[in-house]
Image (spheres, helix red, strand yellow):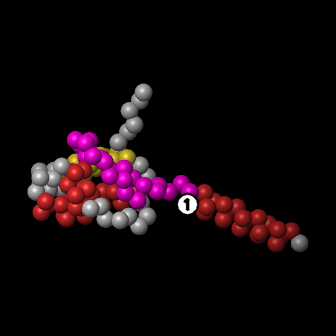
Amino acid sequence: MRTPHVVALSLVVFGVGIAAAQDMSLKTVEVTAEEGKHALTMACVNPEEPSLQDVQDVLNVSDPAQAPGLRTKLMGAAAEACAAKEPKIMVMRSASGGLTWKPMKDKAM
């Protein structure tokens, strides 16, 4: 008689654990460039592509022809930050056209 109760209780505990893990996932990531003049918030689940203008603003792109390629790299950096559960990142462009990111830490007050 006790076996069904133990099994049912185990399933409830397992279900609560899964629900808690899903609640801990990151919903958005805020992306700022090194210059820090503009920021962009991107969803972690089913992110929409940022507009080319947003990419140009955040990354301070002077040549609009570079924006489509940088948009792909920016989305990749945001996806990596989501996986790493980093809510705020700073992206940096390299001279070779690459894009790297690092976590942004809140300033202590």
Where is residue 74 drawn, in percent x and y? 27, 58
Can residue 23 be seen here? The reply is yes
Task: Say which element carries label 1.
Answer: helix
Query: Tag 1: residue type?
Result: Gln
The image shows a total of numbered marks equal to: 1
Q: Is residue 90 left or right of residue 68?
A: right
In the picture, measured across the screen, residue 27 lies left or right of residue 50, that is right
The span shown in magenta is: 23-43
**For residue 36: magenta?**
yes
**Is residue 14 or residue 58 the one in the foreground?**
58
Give above or below for 89 relative to 42.
above
Residue 84 in view: no
Residue at image coords 29%, 61%: 50
Tell me: 83 left or right of 32: right
Q: Name the residue under label 1.
A: 22
* Residue shown at the point (60%, 57%) measured from the top left: 20
The picture quadrant where one finds residue 65 is bottom left
Q: Where is residue 77 in the image (x, y as percent from the top left)?
A: 30, 56
Q: Residue at x 40, y 37 (%)?
A: 106
Q: Where is residue 29 in the image (x, y as percent from the top left)?
A: 39, 53
